[in-house]
């Protein structure tokens, strides 16, 4: 899977897509591969305030639990409810249908500090 | 072996330790004695145990019939010395036994999921409270004063460093929790209401009414059960969100206080917040039924400080004893056992109430324990009863200063009718004497 250029990435393997003042957050294909079969996602509620670099929830596979670190700061405006019934979507379409939350960005400039698709590709290429 | 390790003596194995921390004298152990001398020693010490006494003590530990088969099964080497079933392939027996235990606990408590057991009722109750805290995100807990004092102590110990606020809610003349006080105290910052049923005074609480109070404020109802045999007759607290139970009554002898086994049972929707181990049923690669430890990501070896509990074990052998016991009794046997408890306790109360000065303390319904008020110091009465080889009831004064004249009496199916009559006669005689 390639890494879409429309997304920006973190070293903790999250991505964000900024559209206006709304940021959509997810985990990367690299993350879902490392975790294995995902069985559960623990997400914040609408209205929750999240901070860049801080944990906003966790992703659970059969063998591990991983904190999800937020790539941006803001307020949660939407949560992907489909993941509760079908957490395996994260393994199938981590960059698209399996987005985690949408936030209203409190500091849109944060996005610029994140990795581009090319930089992230290099980063995970170096890791594996 | 020393030669293999490349050292001259056992002392050399510790040569890397700093001199100032090393023990300079031999351990204070007596010289070894022969096997038969050891057996003789323990035999004579065991003979010091009281024999031929009638006991009317309960208060969280209950003397019940234990079929001989319980010991036979738990003594099998496969169960007695086996380790934790981490490797499912070689632990199907253990895992299936745990799964059966969990199933029985659900059937008894009316809940949907039960764990593989905790240490005992006191820690199970505490873990249930912590579970409620995680589920609600709240830190205030309303606890009935009629919850076992030692369970409350354990809860306070855990709560101290977890930022939980424990508030006591009193009881009424029925012996039940004061629902008016509860309603006055409940707010949307309460994680749980905790009651015991039958409670420490022996009185059975009304779970459905209490669940309504809890749920109206978004709080959870935790029901703690110290006497599991009551479930042979009393309607289980199905309205409770979490049930914490002591399994000692099922096939575990009182044993001077332990080891016992605790249970946490709850709704399936809360399972990810459940503490302790969980055995699950699945199918293997060939489609055959198998059992595994499941949802391990709740546990400490994976989630570390965010785990649902720091218990990295369960009381497998004790839980097995409970499983064997309940399997041997069956539904009808447990019911019959419970009926005998109820009948004998009622009989005991009626005999004691005939004694001038002895009064029933609470008018709420009870199972196999009830509280009486005595016209004289409970401690002194018990001292006199002991001379008659009767272990008298528990004085409530030490834990409940307002109940300094009261005593908690427990009667199980193992108390012969003759002993109940003897107890009543002895008490009558003691109270008839000048103070």
Image: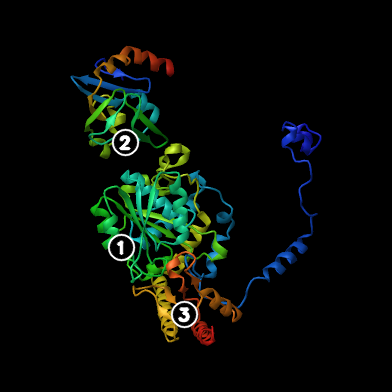
Q: Which residue is mark 1?
A: B207
The residue at 58%/59% (across/down) is B76
Q: Which residue is mark 2?
A: A41
Could you give the CA–CA distance between mark 2 and mark 3, rounded to whole angstroms? Answer: 62 Å
Q: Which residue is mark 3?
A: B375
The residue at 37%/45% (across/down) is B273
Circles 2 and 1 on the same chain = no
Could you give the CA–CA distance between mark 2 and mark 1, rounded to whole angstroms? Answer: 33 Å
Say if residue B276 shows up in the picture. no
Q: Position of residue A70 (x, y in %)?
A: 32, 26
Residue at disc 3, secondary structure: loop
- Does label 3 or label 1 sit earlier along the sequence? 1
Q: Nearer the viewer, residue B313 or B48?
A: B48
Q: Position of residue B120 (x, y in %)?
A: 48, 57
Q: Quadrant of residue A62?
A: top left
B189 to A125, vertically: above or below: below
């Amino acid at each position: 899977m390639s890494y879409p250029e429309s997304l920006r990435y973190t070293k903790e393997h999250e991505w964000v897509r900024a559209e206006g003042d709304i940021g959509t957050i997810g985990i990367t294909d690299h993350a879902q591969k490392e975790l294995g079969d995902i069985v559960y996602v623990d997400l914040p509620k609408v209205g929750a305030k999240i901070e860049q670099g801080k944990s906003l929830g966790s992703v659970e596979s059969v063998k591990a639990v991983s904190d999800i670190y937020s790539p941006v700061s803001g307020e949660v405006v939407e949560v992907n409810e489909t993941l509760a019934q079908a957490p395996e979507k994260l393994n199938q379409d981590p960059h698209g249908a399996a987005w985690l939350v949408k936030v209203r960005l409190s500091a849109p400039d944060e996005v610029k500090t994140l990795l581009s698709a090319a930089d992230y590709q290099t980063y995970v290429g170096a890791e594996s | 072996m020393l030669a293999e390790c490349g050292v001259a003596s056992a002392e050399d194995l510790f040569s890397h330790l700093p001199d100032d921390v090393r023990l300079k004298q031999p351990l204070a152990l007596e010289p070894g004695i022969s096997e038969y001398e050891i057996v003789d020693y323990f035999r004579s010490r065991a003979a010091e145990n009281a024999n031929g006494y009638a006991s009317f003590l309960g208060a969280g530990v209950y003397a019940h019939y234990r079929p001989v088969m319980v010991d036979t099964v738990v003594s099998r080497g496969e169960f007695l010395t086996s380790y934790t079933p981490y490797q499912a392939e070689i632990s199907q027996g253990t895992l299936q036994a745990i799964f059966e235990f969990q199933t029985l606990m659900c059937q008894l408590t009316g809940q949907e999921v039960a764990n593989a057991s905790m240490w005992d009722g006191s820690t199970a109750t505490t873990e249930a409270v912590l579970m409620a805290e995680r589920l609600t995100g709240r830190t205030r807990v309303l606890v009935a004063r009629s919850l076992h004092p030692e369970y409350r102590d354990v809860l306070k110990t855990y709560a101290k460093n977890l930022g939980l606020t424990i508030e006591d809610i009193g009881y009424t003349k029925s012996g039940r929790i004061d629902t008016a006080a509860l309603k006055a105290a409940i707010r949307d910052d309460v994680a749980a209401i905790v009651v015991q049923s039958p409670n420490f005074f022996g009185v059975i609480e009304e779970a459905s009414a209490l669940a309504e109070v809890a749920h109206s404020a978004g709080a959870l109802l935790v029901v703690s059960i110290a006497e599991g045999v009551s479930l042979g007759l009393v309607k289980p607290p199905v309205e409770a969100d979490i049930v914490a139970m002591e399994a000692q009554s099922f096939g575990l002898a009182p044993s001077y206080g332990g080891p016992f086994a605790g249970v946490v049972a709850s709704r399936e929707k809360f399972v990810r917040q459940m503490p302790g181990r969980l055995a699950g049923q699945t199918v293997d690669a060939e489609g055959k039924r198998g059992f595994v430890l499941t949802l391990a990501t709740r546990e400490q070896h994976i989630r570390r400080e965010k785990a649902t509990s720091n218990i990295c074990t369960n009381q497998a052998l004790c839980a097995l004893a409970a499983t064997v016991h309940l399997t041997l009794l069956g539904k009808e046997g447990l019911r019959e056992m419970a009926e005998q408890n109820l009948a004998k306790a009622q009989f005991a109360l009626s005999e004691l109430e005939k004694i001038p000065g002895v009064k029933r303390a609470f008018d709420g319904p009870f199972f196999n324990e009830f509280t009486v008020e005595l016209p004289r110091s409970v401690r002194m009465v018990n001292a006199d009863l002991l001379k008659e080889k009767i272990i008298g009831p528990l004085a409530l004064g030490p834990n409940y200063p307002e109940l300094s004249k009261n005593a908690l009496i427990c009667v199980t199916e193992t108390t012969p009718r003759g002993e109940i009559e003897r107890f009543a006669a002895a008490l009558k005689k003691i109270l008839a004497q000048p103070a």
